[in-house]
Image: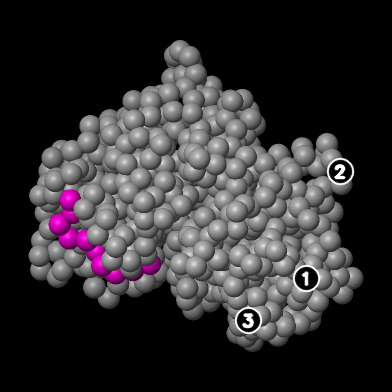
């Protein structure tokens, strides 16, 4: 069989993959040399995809309360329970919690069902946990959730600043591209800003071991230096408002707040200020904070003040964790957004979408964001919940509390590949979903590149695509407009809607793709008008009412101090070879050889003070939960700031339900949880 061009299901780099079934049940995987995102490269996770395709343990048929059921009865049950709950308690008593693993077509149907037909915006996504602060920061500054740059900007820059990003482990192929560019052009400088000395630091010219949470202070200091030393761009500032207020707030920040040696701080400020082509790449270390939106805007302020945006080799660049976090943003998968980057709170936008959908009951206000959604499940405001392709009983902050809330909910449906995830075990109805290699649709990567995911194997058992499940439930609830036969038809409808959005000024207009040959679809960066190599904002026009970008005043803060009872601040994150809760990567033996169990990375001074030896077990706890982790002693973390990975879910020691320890603190603008920070106690176990 010839190879099938598809896209990796893991991180937001969005690498192209050629999958070739070998005819004996196996699949050969290689990087797609023609895909512009990776040009044939794959990281170890992508390369091991062929080892993760076993259907052993898969959910093969619908289940109702633990009993095998037909699709008809399961879909009828979901539709009936949603309809009954809405009739009794109103549209806001039901919710969908979806995932950056969904394909854009799945996302589109879910969003249309909730916001246009059920009449509630109670649809949110695990992307809320990933990059909602970037969305909010973009919208405050640009008037739209527009990612200005493209990957090639990292290769064209003279300085790449990586802040809150362990690029080498979390976006490995983009890191490979960056390192390859530096090998050819050693003058390209790389600065890593991270409290931890991560693998990304090994290829960097400078590592700033910033005080945890001090990012906004650092970029405020940079803004002051830019202003005080004549590095502002007067021509570009015609396109910007808010400089004076932003500077006034920035001046409150002090070098001491960064915790950096003065020489390192000065070196960074001078390098950034004196380099024209700067790309500032940021990720979860910025976003997953209770002041994440301010941190994003502190970064954007520096680029706007200097006009380092919209041109090759420069700009702020948010990179997303998940394969289709961007597609979810574009399609309106967040509770506070409408489709195609339209504004849910704008009546003109709502009317346009309602008219296009012929929708009977448009949501008129934002729905509940993830943390608030599960609080509403807990207190009974939400009585029927449908979770698709995500595992909130493990991954939400305060995860044990979320698990208890789901367990007590009147009705829970879960669409997933496996029946035994922490969330699936709590479901009344389980719906078997098609997985990677079995389903068809599109995804958008971090640089706005839309690519096809293509199936190369039939779904096992009775597993079906998510868009089909959602459309079937919608039809059984009595709604018209959900009678597609294929994801190609859904994409076409979506592209036509984006044309409507374009007439209303949205940046997201892919109507040029209407009628596109879906099977032959080649990766394309939107907007098509810009073509590859084009940049947003090159003309200095933004999507705000006056067309000018807004610099935001950012009053930088630091995380609350630790206490005597909880003297450590735990940092969380990914490891190189695992993905989310390991339902797929955990199947590949070679991926568990790197780091095979949950661990606590602890500074030697902390370990000595606690009497903890290497490879011993430590109990990590606070009032929210408790984990038992294997101790890894390392001076790559700062004293008082241990690190633990987020992937493990086990119930016997060592146990790695790290998000059980993370409080449900959220950013007040974006609603994104502060998943990077939990104050904890540690003791030998
Ligand atoms: Fe997949 Fe990301 Fe690795 Fe590319 S870098 S192969 S998208 S996990």
Dominant SS in magenta: loop
Quarter of image, res 38: top right
The foreground one among 445 and 626 is 445
Magenta-drawn segment? 358-369
The foreground one among 320 and 613 is 320
- Residue at 79% x, 81% y is 256
Give x and y (percent) for residue 140.
51, 68
Give x and y (percent) for residue 475.
14, 45
SS under mark 3 = helix
Disc 3: which residue: 245
Mark 1 and mark 3: Cα distance apart in space: 15 Å
Disc 1: which residue: 226
- Residue at 35% x, 45% y is 499
- Residue at 60% x, 47% y is 535
Q: Which sits earlier in the primary sequence, circle 2 or circle 3?
A: 2
Give x and y (percent) for residue 11.
55, 45
SS under mark 1 = helix
């Amino acid at each position: 069989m010839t190879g099938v061009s598809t896209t990796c299901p893991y991180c937001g780099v969005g690498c192209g993959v050629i999958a070739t079934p070998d005819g004996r049940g196996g699949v050969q995987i290689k990087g797609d040399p023609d895909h512009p995102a990776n040009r044939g490269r794959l990281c170890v996770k992508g390369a091991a995809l062929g080892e993760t395709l076993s259907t052993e343990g898969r959910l093969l048929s619908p289940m109702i309360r633990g009993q095998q059921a037909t699709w008809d009865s399961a879909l009828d049950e979901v539709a009936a329970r949603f309809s009954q709950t809405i009739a009794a308690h109103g549209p806001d008593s039901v919710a969908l919690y979806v995932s950056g693993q969904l394909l854009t077509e799945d996302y589109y149907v879910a969003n249309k069902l909730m916001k246009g037909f059920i009449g509630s915006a109670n649809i949110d996504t695990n992307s809320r946990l990933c990059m909602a602060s970037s969305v909010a920061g973009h919208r405050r500054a640009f008037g739209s959730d527009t990612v200005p740059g493209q990957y090639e900007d990292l290769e064209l820059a003279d300085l790449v600043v990586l802040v809150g990003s362990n690029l080498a482990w979390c976006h490995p192929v983009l890191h490979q591209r960056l390192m390859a560019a530096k090998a050819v052009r050693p003058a390209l400088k790389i600065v890593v800003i991270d409290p931890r000395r991560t693998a990304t630091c090994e290829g960097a010219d400078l590592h700033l071991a910033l005080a945890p949470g001090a990012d906004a202070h650092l970029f405020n200091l940079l803004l002051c230096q830019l202003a005080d030393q004549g590095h502002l761009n007067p021509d570009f500032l015609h396109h910007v408002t808010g400089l004076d207020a932003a500077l006034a707030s920035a001046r409150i920040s002090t070098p001491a707040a960064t915790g950096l040696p003065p020489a390192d701080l000065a070196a960074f400020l001078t390098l950034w200020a004196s380099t024209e082509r700067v790309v500032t790449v940021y990720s979860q270390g910025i976003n997953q904070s209770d002041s994440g939106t301010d941190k994003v805007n502190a970064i954007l302020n520096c680029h706007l003040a200097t006009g380092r945006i919209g041109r090759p080799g420069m700009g702020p660049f948010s990179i997303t964790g998940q394969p289709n976090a961007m597609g979810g943003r574009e399609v309106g998968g967040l509770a506070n957004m409408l489709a195609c980057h339209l504004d849910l709170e704008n009546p003109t936008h709502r009317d346009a979408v309602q008219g296009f959908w012929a929708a009977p009951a448009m949501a008129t206000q934002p729905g509940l964001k993830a943390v608030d959604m599960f609080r509403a499940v807990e207190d009974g405001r939400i009585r029927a919940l449908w979770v698709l392709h995500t595992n909130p009983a493990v991954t939400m902050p305060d995860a044990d509390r979320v698990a208890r809330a789901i367990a007590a909910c009147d009705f829970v449906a879960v669409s997933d590949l496996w029946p035994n995830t922490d969330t699936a075990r709590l479901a009344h109805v389980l719906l078997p979903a098609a997985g990677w290699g079995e389903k068809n649709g599109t995804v958008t990567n971090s640089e706005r590149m839309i690519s096809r995911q293509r199936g190369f194997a039939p779904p096992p058992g009775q597993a079906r695509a998510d868009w089909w499940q959602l459309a079937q439930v919608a039809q059984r609830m009595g709604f018209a407009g959900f009678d597609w036969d294929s994801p190609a038809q859904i994409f076409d409808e979506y592209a036509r809607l984006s044309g409507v959005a374009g007439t209303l000024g949205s940046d997201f207009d892919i109507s040029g793709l209407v009628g596109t040959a879906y099977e032959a679809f080649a990766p394309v960066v939107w907007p098509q008008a810009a073509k590859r190599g084009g940049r947003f904002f090159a003309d200095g026009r933004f999507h705000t009412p006056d067309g000018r970008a807004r610099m935001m005043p950012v009053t930088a803060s630091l995380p609350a101090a630790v206490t005597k009872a909880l003297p450590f601040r735990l940092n969380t994150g990914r490891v190189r070879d695992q993905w989310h809760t390991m339902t797929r990567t955990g199947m590949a033996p070679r991926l568990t050889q790197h780091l095979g169990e949950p661990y606590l990375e602890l500074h030697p001074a902390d370990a000595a003070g606690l009497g903890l030896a290497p490879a011993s077990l430590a109990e990590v706890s606070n009032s929210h939960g408790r984990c038992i982790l294997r101790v890894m002693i390392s001076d790559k973390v700062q004293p008082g700031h241990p690190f633990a990975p987020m992937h493990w879910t086990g119930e016997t020691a060592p146990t790695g339900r790290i998000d059980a320890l993370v409080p449900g603190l959220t950013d007040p603008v974006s609603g994104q949880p502060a998943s990077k920070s939990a104050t904890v106690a540690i003791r030998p176990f």
